[in-house]
Image (cartoon, coloured by chain):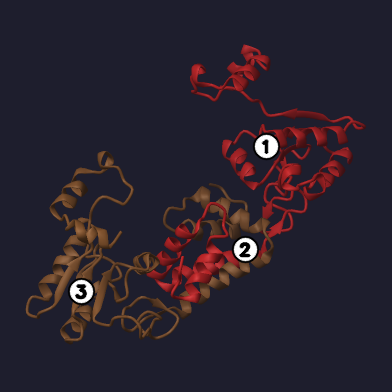
Chain colours: A red, B brown
Amino acid sequence: MEFSSKLLENAVYEMSQLPGIGKRTALRLVLHLLRQPESQTAHLVSALGTLRKEIKFCKNCHSISDDQICDICSNNSRFKDIICVVEDIRDVMAIESTGQYRGLYHVLGGKISPLDGIGPQDLTISSLITKAKSGEVKELIFALSATMEGDTTNFYIYKQLEEITIKTSTIARGISVNDELEYADEVTLGRSILNRIPFENALKNP
Amino acid sequence: MEFSSKLLENAVYEMSQLPGIGKRTALRLVLHLLRQPESQTAHLVSALGTLRKEIKFCKNCHSISDDQICDICSNNSRFKDIICVVEDIRDVMAIESTGQYRGLYHVLGGKISPLDGIGPQDLTISSLITKAKSGEVKELIFALSATMEGDTTNFYIYKQLEEITIKTSTIARGISVNDELEYADEVTLGRSILNRIPFENALKNP
C-alpha cells in the first residue's frame, strides 16, 4: 500500500497492530474517523489514553477496576469463602450476567501456554495459592475454558493445593440448554453422560 | 454488558463507534491493548490524534496530503490535462498501484446519495467544474463505482459540462483478467460484449 500522507500511513499502521485488523480495515476505520466530526476522534483518543494510564487492577482478585479493590470484592453481601478462578474480565462479566453466582473471583490473566511463552509466573497463580492457604477460602471453582491450556492450568493449580484441605470444583460441561443431542459433539455428549446429575437436582435448578 | 470499570466501559463504547466494530470486538481490542506495553496505546492514540488535527486536503485534488498540494499534483512529470474523478483516497491508491495512469486525480469525497443525505454540495463537484471550465483540462475519466449512486454522480457532473467542450470517458467494465466466463454475472458479461474492443488494442495492452 502506497500512502500519499505520512500521517495517514502512521495512523493506519498503528490501527493495524490491533488483533484481527488488517491494513485495509485499518484504512477504512481511519478514513471513517476523518469523515466524522473531530470530537469523535478526540473522545476515542482520550478514552483509550486515560484507560491505559489510569487502569487499576483489583488488589484482591486482579480484575480491572477503577479503585484499589473492585466492586465485587468490596461488596459485603457476597460470599468471601468461594472463589471462581477465571482467565480474564470477560469471563467475570459473563458469569455475573447469569446472576447465579454470589462468591468472589480470581482473574488469572491468561492460561499456562508454553507455546505462547506463558508460564505460571506470568499469571496471578501465586497470589491465588496464598489466598487458598490463608484458610479463609472453602472452595475454588475452576472456570477456565476446556482446552489443553485450560486443563493444564487447572491441574497446575490443583497440584499446588495438595498439602491443604480445600474443596475444588469445575463448572459443568454438557449439552447447552435448548441444544439438540444429535448436533452435539461427541466429547461434550460423552462428558455430559459421565457427569450426569440426579434428576431431582435438575428439577431444583431449572 | 455490565462493566466493573467506568474507564473500561468508556473505552469500549468509543471503540464500538467505529464501523463494523461491535461491543464484543471493542472489548477484545481494548483488553488486547491493556495486555500490551503502554507504549503501543500511546503510539496509537498519538497517531490518530495527530492525523485528525493536522490532516490537510490537497487544494487541487482534495486528496489527503501532508502539504497544501499533494505529491501527485506537484509532480511535474504527470499530465496536468487529464483528470481521473474518484470517490476517495482508496481509489487513488488502487489506481496508483497499477502504474498505468500518469494524469492527475480529483477526489469527490463520496457519491451523490439522497438516501444518505449526500447532495452535490457535500462533494467537491463545484471545484471540479471550475477546473474543467478553466480550459486547461482535456479529458475527465470517471472512475466511480458502478452503482446507482456512482452513475447518478457521473451523470450529474456530465450534465454540468454540457456547455463546454471536454472529452469525458469512464473506466472499462468487463470480465476480470483470469476470471472464467461461466462465473461472471450477466450484467458485467453483457457490458463486456457491448463495449468490446478491437483485438489489436488488446494485443497492445496485455
Q: Are marks 3 and 1 on the same chain?
A: no
- Disc 2/disc 3 C-alpha distance (Å): 49 Å
Instruction: Please name the amino acid that badge 2 sits on.
Output: Leu
Image coordinates of residue A164 in percent, x first then y, are: 91, 32
Asked where in the image residue B5 lies, by quadrant, the reply is bottom right
Q: Which residue is mark 3?
A: B140
Image coordinates of residue B38 in percent, x first then y, are: 68, 65
Position of the C terminus of chain B, as image quadrant, is bottom left
Can I make out residue A42 in this image?
no
Question: Depth-wise, is mark 2 or mark 3 nearer the camera?
Answer: 3
- Disc 3/disc 1 C-alpha distance (Å): 69 Å
Question: Depth-wise, is mark 3 or mark 1 nearer the camera?
Answer: 3
Question: Depth-wise, is mark 1 or mark 2 nearer the camera?
Answer: 2
Q: Nearer the viewer, residue B85 or B196?
A: B196
Q: Secondary structure at mark 1?
A: loop
Residue A65 drawn above or below residue B70: above
* Residue drawn where x is 68% and y is 15% of the image: A194
Residue that protrudes farthest toward the right in the picture: A163
Density class for disc 2 (Cα within 10 Å; few <14, some 14-19, many ≥20) is many
Q: Which residue is mark 2?
A: A51
Q: Which residue is mark 1?
A: A102
Image coordinates of residue A88 in percent, x first then y, are: 67, 46
